[in-house]
Image (tube, rainbow, N blue to C red):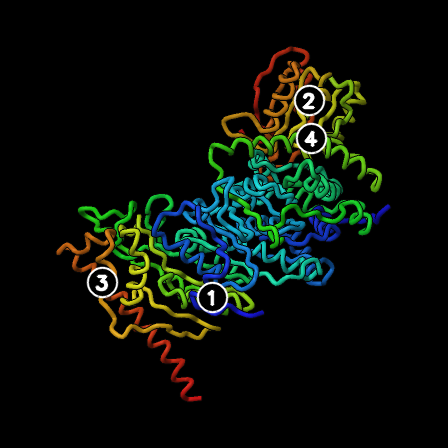
Amino acid sequence: MSTTPLRLKELSKKDELLTGGHRLCAGCGAPIAVRQVLLAAEMPVIASNATGCLEVSTTIYPYSAWKIPWIHTAFENAAATISGVEAMYRSLKKQGKIKERIKFIAFGGDGGTYDIGFQSLSGAMERGHDIVYICYDNGAYMNTGIQRSSATPLGANTTTSPAGSVIPGKVQPRKNLTKIMAAHGIPYVAQTTPAHWRDLMTKVRKALDVDGPAFINVLASCNRGWRTPTDTTIADTKMAVETCFWPLYEYENGRLTINYKPKEKKPVTEFLKTQGRFKHLFSPENEGILERAQELVDREWEALLREESLYKSEEEKA
Amino acid sequence: MGKKLAVTGNQAVAEAMRQINPDVCAAYPITPSTEVMQRFASFVADGKVDTELVTVESEHSAMSACIGAAAAGGRVMTATSSQGLALMWEMLHIASGMRFPIVMPLVNRALSAPINIHGDHSDGMGSRDCGWIQLFSENGQEAYDNLIQAIRIAEHDDVRLPAMVCMDGFIISHSIESMEYLPDDVVRNFIGEFRPKNPLLDIENPVTYGPLVLPDFFMEFKRQQHEAMLNVKDVVLDVAREFEKISGRGYGLFEAYRLDDAELALVILNSAAGTAKDVIDEYREKGIKVGLLKPRLFRPFPYKEVAEALSSARVIGVLDRADSLGGFGPMYMEISSAMTTNGAKPLMINKIYGLGGRDFMPEHVVQVIDELKEIAETGNIRLQKDFLGVRE
């Protein structure tokens, strides 16, 4: 089977499998990511979807924006649900009742992935199902009205971590789920953004290509929660990468590759300052939080560079 | 006729599952149902079934994976007890709301707290309103027979609903009884091939499962589920008639034991009904007209048929192995509804017994029958709801 080259001209000829007419907000990062995922896939895919914005806004009965087989059951179990679909596929294939090659994708937001769906995700990955889990991480429970999740960055103002006169927004740093998934020892783990569409689609193809579980974490902005205009989604997610707040990297069979190293790493304030959720951090009394935010970014980025260099020096020895 | 063997309830259920040969099972261990999946895992490991066994990390994921597998298009089973069922609770509603004919043995066990691993019906009764068909079984033979019939009932075109088959934890699941298995080919012919409806795996015809349904359509979905439930009674009876042909064992919506002319009646589920039958025989020898109704189909509840079967009874003692704390036991509420809806006004009492596996002895049955007799003679009820075999 010929593979569509990752060029806009060729990709624009492919059918969109998440159609227009859904009710996601203008500027939402989630459908941009999903469309890129589905455009990247070169074989039939079946998706499960955790409860969340993407699910409620794309399937308001009797309408559906999905042109692929799709299932939503609940919030915390997109991974368990797709693992059941995949198990049935394997069973029927083994029994000779199905011939086609089909791949399986689960979509979940950060709440449904980092928090309530964490156990289900970890279990499905450990069991080795041939599935790709894609988290669209917008850093809070946006569907229920911007409540903090374990993906919410340090200092963010959300409705359950409000920037008050005593507590200045979320006091904890975000959980590094991509690294936790890498620690599962699964064949493929990556993080990317919809601003880096070729990177995202290349990663989706790699994830679909492996025989076994894969996880991709996609930073997808939410203009409601980030308090940004609806036309800066791409610029905002790009800045997350330029500041190394959200580095582009992947683990292929446990080996780390950093896919992009900014020539000049921008200060994290460049990412934070355009977003209303961090506005209060720029008051003089919250200077310490900005310093801490920069330290967190620096520490993660340096750790990634060190880890990558270990593999490189091993290669040199060999 | 099949083989006669001495086996435990769990063994019998696992054997039925081997014969059913589901396409996917997703399960998580919990006492006292663990042995079912343990035995089934050996069948998978030895290639005796085609099943993909998904050994999930929780019962919530077990039911989620079952739902995913059922949507994909195939026959799906799991088994659980107590806390496991409680953890599944959210997904039980989703399985029935999405109309997937998943079949699940439920080895009844008390719900915490306090933690207790022994048999009572608080788990099954707690899932009464989840939209599942519920069949109860007195012994291992009934659990085996019910499980095979449940496949046909759940998958019937007029039904397409999930079904749970209940048996008492330890009392039945771990006790060895003499029973009979049907030959494999007889079971396979009886259940037939699974017929998928709008499977997710049909990539040529993509379907959306589990959309957001707002107030404009939601009630129609629930109404349709209720209509499907109403179809269950006839299907249960049809399937039972066919099952009798292959097994020689007859089943109905309930078992009416010496009930025809009974003035005093007991209503008891599952294993305790067996104990009660022996005591009833003793009373019958003394000329006392007492009988027993042992419900088999609890959801949907056959109100009219139950009321008719109990129509000669002047006093009814309903025994519940689960309690709705602060209310009557769940079976009492059903019997009360059945009788009053049918215009009957028997005197009724409710006894809560056997919670957390507390022994239910013949003397408890004696105590209840004597009380029913006294109520019949005096017309007076001392306590509407009371506990049997409990310390004061």
Which residue is farthest right? B1
Relative to A238, is B70 above or below?
above
Q: Chain of mark 2?
A: B
Which residue is farthest left? A284
Q: Nearer the viewer, residue A163 or A105?
A: A105
For numbered disc 3, what is the local secondary structure? helix
Give the amino acid at mark 3: Glu
Give the spatial CA distance, label 2 vs label 3. Answer: 72 Å
Residue A23's spot in the image, x, y percent?
A: 41, 45
Give the amino acid at mark 4: Pro
Q: Nearer the viewer, residue B86 or B271?
A: B86
Q: What residue is at 74 percent from the left and 21 percent from the top?
A: B290
Give the spatial CA distance, label 4 vs label 1. Answer: 65 Å
Label ID, residue A228: none
Asked if residue A240 shows in the view, the reply is: yes
Q: Nearer the viewer, mark 1 or mark 3?
A: 1
Which residue is the site of mark 1? A10
Q: Chain of mark 1?
A: A
For numbered disc 4, what is the local secondary structure? strand
Q: Image quarter for residue A257? A: bottom left
Asked if residue A183 shows in the view, the reply is: no
